[in-house]
Amino acid sequence: TLAGGGRAGPESAWFDRNGGEISLEDFRGRVVLVNFWASWCEPCLRELPSMSRLQVEMAGSDFTVIAINIDREGLPVAAPYSERLGLDALEIYLDPRSRVAREVGVNQMPTTVLYDRDGNEIGRLEGSAEWDEPEAKALLRFFIDKSLPI
């Protein structure tokens, strides 16, 4: 179950694979599922393929999945794991100094945070999940539909 919510999303930027800065503001207008992962986190590596499948199935103008790697070494570590796990649907995003992770209040890995279209936290899950299971998709669809402009 997703718990918590209400606080504004992070203002800190993370990086794309080319070193470009990206922030939650870049995704305004969409419900965003942000996952923090690392190569040393077995539960993270187990759940990432389900996030990639979720992205394939549900991403669009209303919703997207963002997986942010927090390994200090950045791309040289994250890219091989992304390739090995077949995460073609997920961009490689990097937070090597864990600035965004700290701002969000990540205490455990993996942590996944759901944001509404305005960048406010709807809820979070500490620990792993199968994100492409029917229950998870139904919960996400509820929040996507709930936040549609009238």
Image (tube, rainbow, N blue to C red):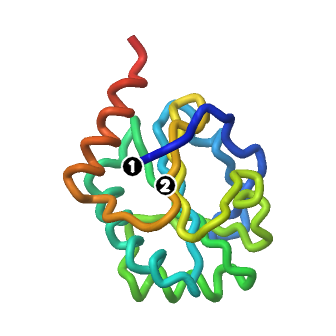
Is 80 on the left or on the right of 53, as rendered? right
Viewer-closest of 64 and 122: 122
Viewer-closest of 2 and 49: 2
Q: Determine whether 37 is above or below 30 in the image.
A: below
Q: Amino acid at mark 1?
A: Thr
From the top left corner, tell me how far across and down residue 144 is, in percent: 37, 33
From the top left corner, tell me how far across and down residue 91 is, in percent: 50, 65
Separation of residues labelled 1 and 2 (CA atoms):
7 Å
Q: Residue at x 80, y 71 (%)?
A: 97
Viewer-closest of 67 and 130: 130
Is 88 on the left or on the right of 80, as rendered? left
Q: Which mark is residue 1?
A: 1
From the top left corner, tell me how far across and down residue 131 is, in percent: 33, 59
Viewer-closest of 92 and 40: 40
Instruction: Identify the residue under disc 2.
Output: 125
From the top left corner, tell me how far across and down residue 85 is, in percent: 38, 83
Q: Residue furthest top?
A: 150
Q: Residue at x 61, y 71 (%)?
A: 69
